[in-house]
Image (cartoon, rainbow, N blue to C red):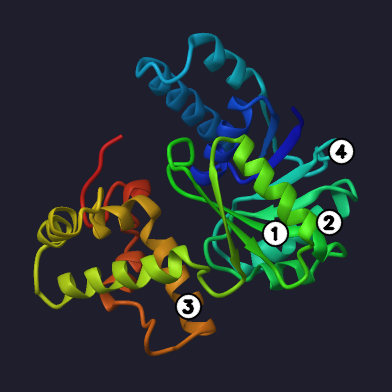
Amino acid sequence: MSNVAVIGAGTMGNGIAHVFAQHGWDATLIDVSQEALDRGVATIKKNLERQEKKGAISHQLSVDTLGRIRSSTNLDNLQNVEIVIEAVSENPDIKFDIFEDLDRLAPKGAILASNTSSISISEIAKVTNRPERVIGMHFMNPVPLMPLVEIVKGKQTSADTVAKTVELATQLGKTPVEVNDAPGFVSNRVLMPMINEAIFCVDEGVATPEAVDQVMKLGMNHPLGPLALADLIGLDVCLAIMKVLQDGLDVHKYQPAPLLEKMVANGQLGRKSGQGFYAYRD
């Protein structure tokens, strides 16, 4: 296949590296923290074992997948990559800094993709000298299981880059859906206000988190209630996306629920912290 680098070894980054390696790519997982890299690789190993136990993949494919993943704390390891996918925290300044580095270090023909869930691809592209090769490749969590990849076209993204990225997503067994650059794109522009409204229901005493989630699961046929989903995404990420929607669209319409802001301030971030609307154990 080819070579990919994934920047960020967290939930999304290790999931993206997992999927690429499982489909024959050599994947370099890069993070500033060796501890984060170790956790990311351990998560990939655990998820491969889970797939194997379910009969979704063979033991040999599991071994081969893990063997195709290497980790590094050095961004200089980009010499042979065809695509780089950034999957760090949802902070524009951090992403801009990373894309400046990627533009300098990655091969001139490489595609620079972001897994951002809400930040403008056109703005990210501005910090590079290759805006035509910058694109959004927004995977869904958990990456190995969810079929959708939201392909986000910036204002200067070339048709060739879009076509190659769509083809790549298809090769990974995903379903690519093309959207234009706008705050929150489609997925989070629709999803986050629903989650935010569910949090308002709890904050205002309309119902408990369990009741809100039951209504949406049993009445609307959602596989996961909005508050359990918020815990899975990370409440800090939900808050960051709501602020992007506020800044880019309407400051009043997308006002984050006070309870969401309070929980994030208290470190109640969902599954990643062990406590959100529900309690979690490893």
Instruction: Give the residue type at disc 3.
Output: Leu
Q: Secondary structure at mark 3?
A: helix
- Image-quadrant location for residue 76: top right
Whole-angstrom CA distance, mark 4 to mark 2, is 12 Å
Mark in the foreground, 3 or 1: 1
Residue at the outermost right position: 108
In the rendered structure, are the residues bearing label 2 and label 3 in contact, judged by CB atoms less than 8 Å apart? no
Residue 195, how many percent across, how many down?
30, 66
In the rendered structure, are the residues bearing label 2 and label 1 in contact, judged by CB atoms less than 8 Å apart? no
From what the image shows, is residue 94 above or below residue 7? Answer: below
Q: Nearer the viewer, residue 33 or 101?
A: 101
Q: Secondary structure at mark 1?
A: strand
Q: Nearer the viewer, residue 76 or 136?
A: 136
Instruction: Give the residue type at disc 2.
Output: Asp
- Image-quadrant location for residue 65: top right
Q: Which residue is mark 1?
A: 135
Q: Secondary structure at mark 2?
A: helix
Going 9% across and 74% down the picture, which residue do you hit? 206
Q: Is residue 31 visible?
A: no
In the rendered structure, are the residues bearing label 4 and label 1 in contact, judged by CB atoms less than 8 Å apart? no
Q: Which residue is mark 2?
A: 103
Q: Which residue is mark 4?
A: 79
Instruction: Give the residue type at disc 1.
Output: Ile
Mark in the foreground, 4 or 1: 1
Q: Could you tell which of marks 4 and 2 lies nearer the N-terminus?
A: 4
Q: Nearer the viewer, residue 154 or 254?
A: 154
Whole-angstrom CA distance, mark 3 to mark 1, is 20 Å
Whole-angstrom CA distance, mark 4 to mark 3, is 36 Å
